[in-house]
Amino acid sequence: MNIESKIAASVGEAILKLYGQEVNSTQIQLSKTKKEFEGHLTLVVFPFLRISKKNPEQTALEIGHYLQENEPVISSFNVIKGFLNLVIDAKVWIELLQTIANDAQYGIVSADDNSPLVMIEYSSPNTNKPLHLGHVRNNLLGFSLAEILKANGNRVVKTNIVNDRGIHICKSMLAWKKYGNGETPESTGMKGDHLVGKYYVVFDKEYKAQIKELTDAGQNIDEAKRNAPLMLEAQEMLRQWEANDTEIVEMWRMMNSWVYAGFDESYKKLGVDFDKIYYESETYLEGKNKVLEGLANNVLYQKEDSSVWADLTGDGLDHKLLLRGDGTSVYMTQDIGTAKLRYDDYPINKMVYVVGNEQNYHFQVLAILLDKLGFEWGKSLVHFSYGMVELPEGKMKSREGTVVDADDLVDEMVNTARETSQELGKLDGCTTEEAEKIAYTVGMGALKYFILKVDPRKNMTFNPKESIDFNGNTGPFIQYTHARICSVLRKAEEQGIELNKAIEKSLTLSEKEQTLIQLIADFKNVVKDAGKEYSPAIIANYIYDLVKEYNQFYHDHSILKEENEGLRHFRLMLSKNVAKVINSGMALLGIEVPERM
RNA sequence: GGUCUCGUAGCUCAGUUGGAUAGAGCAACAGCCUUCUAAGCUGUGGGUCGUGGGUUCGAAUCCCGCCGGGAUCACCA
């Protein structure tokens, strides 16, 4: 039983003894005491005034006295207005720290064969252009969420659905064929995804030129868009692809393979990975079958032009198209097919989709459709919806060249980390390899932490210049603190100080030291909350609080130079466990913490 | 227009099962390196929590109206 619930039980007992009435546990609100007051936990007594029939101070005093006498965990208390601040005995903290120290996996619940199986879909790129800042947020959130779910006792399958078919890839293919002069990643030295992306842009440029010609010749804009030769050719190419034209399919394979090689590199740099990858080119026919089955069962209906629709007016939504008149599938159809394949492949208990909030409607519809089509898990799918990343100038627009490329961003972060490290003299005496490793770890730490510390549901602003900051609430600040603790522990070992001795229980601890233990102990609940809320940000902000507190402690107290052996030992143990929690917490964010920097 | 969502310091963000004087970082200014790593620590200034009502002992947090931003309502993915 943890300290908080133990005290809550005693409070209930106190009220029963003092006022002769039972209160249910939800009325007993224990929260952390605010910094400026003395104490660790605070009981809000307002809810009990009706029972005590006394004023707030009087009530708080009576409960306080009862607890002090009858609950050994409480050593003293103070009352301010209706708030009863309880001071927990130092012995209790010391015991708690000792318990945590003996648990190598503190706060982590590992999964076994009977644990729920969660599949989490993230990343899901198109194969016609490289990854950008928006994908970075998606990838980091998805990976972190998977780690958090694992730490909460789930089996997790990470999956990626690649949008490798459709008009978008035909546009790149066509432009490459017409204007590419047979360029390849090898011949140009370009990363494959960037090369293909280049021709996507070329297509757009040439297409626009053709539209202008046509409008100048008197056509209106919609006509021009439809009639531009390039667009007609791209559509023809898509038809040929669907008809399995050898030449087109070969080109499609080749260019996609370039893109995959490029993506693999980007994923590796970002530190994300997948257990199973699905391709839309392989799932869309499955969706079509499922839709036709639904049509046969009268769940769906067909219009005169033979297109197939779902009537969702009963759910407060509109009619939704699932198959075009020519029998080809749309986005929704593909998602239905992908879902079916996944459930055939794995005994999934829960499906999580990490997809931006601009698709909230899509997933609302998908859940209803899957349910209608007879998938019993349809209604319980989770759309982990995250906000967009905006730049200080506003939204990213690929046409206006204001997209932040993922690879460029990573390089820039690492370069800045390298330069800053050099300026601070952190790399003195390092080999080139070590220096490179530190620059990478710190640069990526800064990027990942910056993105993950923000509530995923909110839109966020990313200023490429100002965001590369290593002071304050940042990844490097946390990494730095960890490195410093490791250094202290190394020195302790060099001095022959034993680290794993039991702590003396008679020590007098400072307020800060007790607060730190309280914070360390909180880690367990924080991991649980993060899992429940699907929010890496909860972890990030918690670690920052812990680290900030530790840094203050570090400056106010000596550790190695402490004369009192028992106290020195306690402080080492405390530091070691702060490092342990930082390490576990940052691992849940996918951020490495170095032992020296 | 319908639906959803957001609005907290100059900037980026915390803070919501309703609790004390609304917190950090950045930016500005002032201190601290013969002292376990100064990517650090300490201090100063900076707020009608968009706005107006309501609910109650108590509202940034819950409810309603309004203002402002964003998303979505495709035979695109």
Image (cartoon, coloured by chain):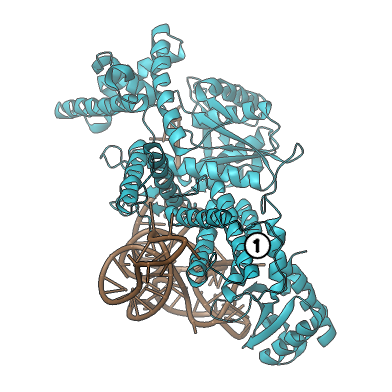
In the displayed structure, would residue A575 be above or below residue A86? above
Q: Quadrant of residue A374?
A: top right
Q: Nearer the viewer, residue A202 or A434?
A: A434
Q: Quadrant of residue A512?
A: bottom right
Residue A262, given in percent of the width and then of the height, sits at 40, 27
Tag 1 residue: A521
Q: Which chain is cyan?
A: A
Q: Nearer the viewer, residue A562 or A594?
A: A562
In the displayed structure, would residue A569 be above or below residue A510? above
Q: Is residue A15 left or right of residue A259?
A: right
Q: Residue at x 59, y 42 (%)?
A: A146
Q: Is residue A462 left or right of residue A316?
A: left
Q: Quadrant of the N terminus of chain A?
A: bottom right
Q: Which chain is brown?
A: B
Residue A318 can be seen in this image: no
Q: Residue at x 57, y 23 (%)?
A: A288
The residue furthest left is A216
Q: Residue at x 59, y 22 (%)?
A: A286
Residue A44, given in percent of the width and then of the height, sits at 66, 79
- Estimate how packed mark 1 is, as few (under 14), some (14 to 19) or many (20 or more) residues with alpha carbons within 10 Å: many
Q: Nearer the viewer, residue A440 or A384?
A: A440
Q: Quadrant of residue A12?
A: bottom right
Residue A100, given in percent of the width and then of the height, sits at 69, 58
Give the residue type that dot 1 points to.
Answer: Ala
Residue A378, given in percent of the width and then of the height, sits at 65, 38
As helix, strand or loop, the secondary structure at mark 1 comes to: helix
Count of residue discs: 1
